[in-house]
Image: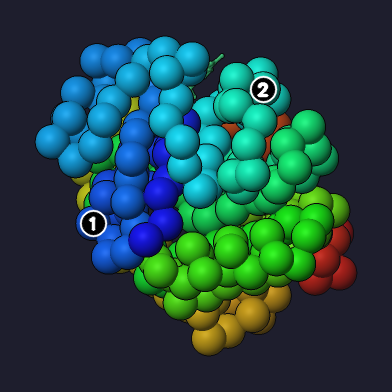
């Protein structure tokens, strides 16, 4: 039996607490969150606390707080032989080096609290300085996921950068598309088949080959028409992305 404590119950901590509280041979001994109210729903599954000085003993402490709070929260964990890990894509491993055993347990997915998630298909990127700690992390990750990847801090930073492009930026573009629909009294659900096909297509076709649209074709007239109907930051985003696409396909706008 592996005893774990999860610190932080935001989007990631919430889902990890949910999955680990139901994983055989894993004992979620405690869940910490700065705001106690948020974790009342876990009272039946584990001991909850908002007091770092009351942390229980465990084999593994998983820190799931905001990046800027990882170091300070980690310093409140009693110095023991336990393995202390964080779940951040962009925070170096060494931020935890005041602990004897430390590592990273970064699930490469976009988590939202109220959206259920299947961990088995989520790649878990793990890093640790010592081989034995890496083995412990691998065993832990394999309890919930089928895809474990060893990644150092530099590679993890790069994959996090790529994730910002394919998730955060794409999602922001969905938002802009949705507002254009709303401004014109069109239901945004009309975009859903297109959104689905855009993401499904790149599973089998490279994004380079999947690209379509006026910028790829070098269709200046359509682009000018769209720009006339855009303003502010959305106009700048449209121009920037159109130029990036046109350059890639050797077109001049
Ligand atoms: N969201 C994702 O999709 C995702 C994916 C992979 C990895 N990550 C990483 O996972 C970690 C958690 O991200 P998240 O999205 O779950 O964050 P989040 O939803 O914004 O939640 C932040 C958590 O940190 C706590 N917190 C913030 N400042 C604190 C402080 N000074 N002291 C103690 N607790 C503090 C918050 O407590 P309160 O509830 O009291 O505010 C909350 O539990 C981050 O390192 C992030 O980079 C996120």
Q: Are marks 1 and 2 in contact (CB under 8 Å)?
A: no
Q: Quadrant of residue 72?
A: top right
- Locate residue 110, reporting x and y percent: 47, 49
Residue farthest along the left direction in this orientation: 44
Q: Is the distance from the Cβ of mark 1 to the nearest ligand 1 atom less than 8 Å? A: no
User: Which residue is drawn at the image coordinates 58% and 68% (left, top)?
Assistant: 138
- Would you name the residue on which mark 2 appears? 75
- Locate residue 97, reporting x and y percent: 80, 37
Q: Is residue 237 visible?
A: yes
Q: Quadrant of the N terminus?
A: bottom left
- Locate residue 14, reporting x and y percent: 34, 38
User: Which residue is drawn at the image coordinates 51% and 48% (left, top)?
Assistant: 59
Which mark, by number, is residue 144? Answer: none
- Locate residue 71, reporting x and y percent: 69, 25
User: Which residue is drawn at the image coordinates 52% and 69% (left, top)?
Assistant: 139
User: Which residue is drawn at the image coordinates 50% and 65% (left, top)?
Assistant: 141
* Relative vertical location of residue 234 with respect to residue 85 in this rendering, above or below: above
Give how far apart the Cα atoms at labels 1 and 2 are. Answer: 28 Å
Q: State how many labels appear.
A: 2
**Label 2 packing within 10 angstroms: few (<14), some (14-19), many (20+):** few
Q: 242 or 110: nearer the eye? A: 110
- Would you name the residue on which mark 1 appears? 22
């Amino acid at each position: 039996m592996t005893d774990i404590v999860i610190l932080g119950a935001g989007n990631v901590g919430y889902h990890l607490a949910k999955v680990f509280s139901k994983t055989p041979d894993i004992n979620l001994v405690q869940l910490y969150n700065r705001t106690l109210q948020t974790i009342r729903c876990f009272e039946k599954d584990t001991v909850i606390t908002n007091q770092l000085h009351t942390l229980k003993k465990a084999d593994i402490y998983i820190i799931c707080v905001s990046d800027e709070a990882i170091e300070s929260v980690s310093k409140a964990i009693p110095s023991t032989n336990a393995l202390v890990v964080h779940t951040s894509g962009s925070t170096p491993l060494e931020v935890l080096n005041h602990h004897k055993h430390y590592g990273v347990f970064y699930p490469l997915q976009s988590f939202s609290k109220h959206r259920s998630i299947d961990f088995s298909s989520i790649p878990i990127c793990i890093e640790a300085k010592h081989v034995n700690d890496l083995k412990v992390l691998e065993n832990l990750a394999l309890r919930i996921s089928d895809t474990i990847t060893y990644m150092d801090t530099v590679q993890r930073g790069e994959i996090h950068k790529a994730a910002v492009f394919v998730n955060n930026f794409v999602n922001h573009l969905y938002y802009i598309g949705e507002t254009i629909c709303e401004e014109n009294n069109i239901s945004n659900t009309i975009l859903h088949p297109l959104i689905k096909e855009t993401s499904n297509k790149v599973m089998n076709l490279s994004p380079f080959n999947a690209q379509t649209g006026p910028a790829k074709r070098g269709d200046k007239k359509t682009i000018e028409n769209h720009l006339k109907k855009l303003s502010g930051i959305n106009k700048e985003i449209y121009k920037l992305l159109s130029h990036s696409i046109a350059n890639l396909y050797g077109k001049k706008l």
